[in-house]
Image (cartoon, helix red, strand yellow):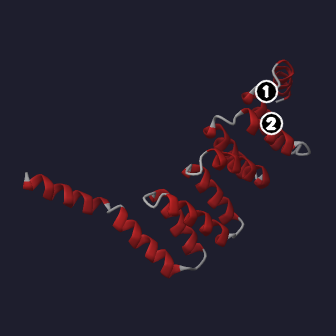
Amino acid sequence: YEWSMVLTNQILRYNPHDPEALGFRIKQAVDGQNLKDLKSMVDDYAEQCKADEQKLIDMAKYLRMRGQYDATVTLLKRVVAMDSLNVEAHIEFVRLMKTFWQYDQGIRDCSDFLAKDPQNASMRIELVDLLISAGQLDRAAEELRAEQRIQPDVETRSMMMGRTARKK
């Protein structure tokens, strides 16, 4: 562990903008509970990885699992600013809201996303999960029905394909 810290610091000394080294330094800080500069480290990392949404999302997931929620939100906001329809970033945000029982905020985010992309099954499933958690069972049932209208289930699709094949 100490050796990896030495190597990371040497890499950053020669290239202070190396995204891999910056990410590793964040993980070292979080794992070692050395969090006093975490915000600036996350900001640096986000700046260096601004063209790589997946790296930002992966780091956000790591930080969420480690309980670093403010840093998680910072990275997810960066991703959404780059691509407002990045479903993975929105799902991570919604799951974070669920962690804190902030169901209304998560439901708003899902609803806003679905207003832009109503065909997105992944986000609709997250919305249904949030609605159930929030005790809004009637609305959850409505969303499930909407999902079935948009994305018929496998059996229905199979039957439709079978009918189409028979008609040929």
Spot occupied by residue 74 in the image (x, y as percentages of width and height): 75, 50
Q: Secondary structure at mark 2?
A: helix
Residue 21, by quadrant, is: top right
Of the 4 image quadrants, the one containing the N terminus is top right
- Residue in view at x 40 percent, y 66 percent: 147
Q: Residue at x 64, y 42 (%)?
A: 58
**Numbered tag placed on residue 44 in the rendering:** 2
Q: Is residue 17 above or below residue 140?
A: above
Along the line of sight, the residue nearer the viewer: 110 or 5:
110
Q: CA distance from mark 1 to mark 2?
A: 8 Å
Amino acid at circle 2: Asp
Residue 25 lies left or right of residue 108; in this view the side is: right
| Nearer-the-camera pick, 4 or 9 | 9
Secondary element at tag 1: loop
Residue 27 appears at what percent x and percent y?
A: 77, 38
Above or below — where is 65 with respect to 123? above
Q: Residue furthest bottom?
A: 138
Residue 21 vertical placement versus 103 (above, below): above
Can residue 81 be seen here? The reply is yes
Callout 1 touching callout 2 (CB < 8 Å): yes
Query: In this picture, is 85 found above or below 58?
Result: below
- Residue 106 is labelled as none
Q: Residues within 10 Å of mark 1 (few under 14, many from 20)?
A: some
Read off the residue under disc 1: 17
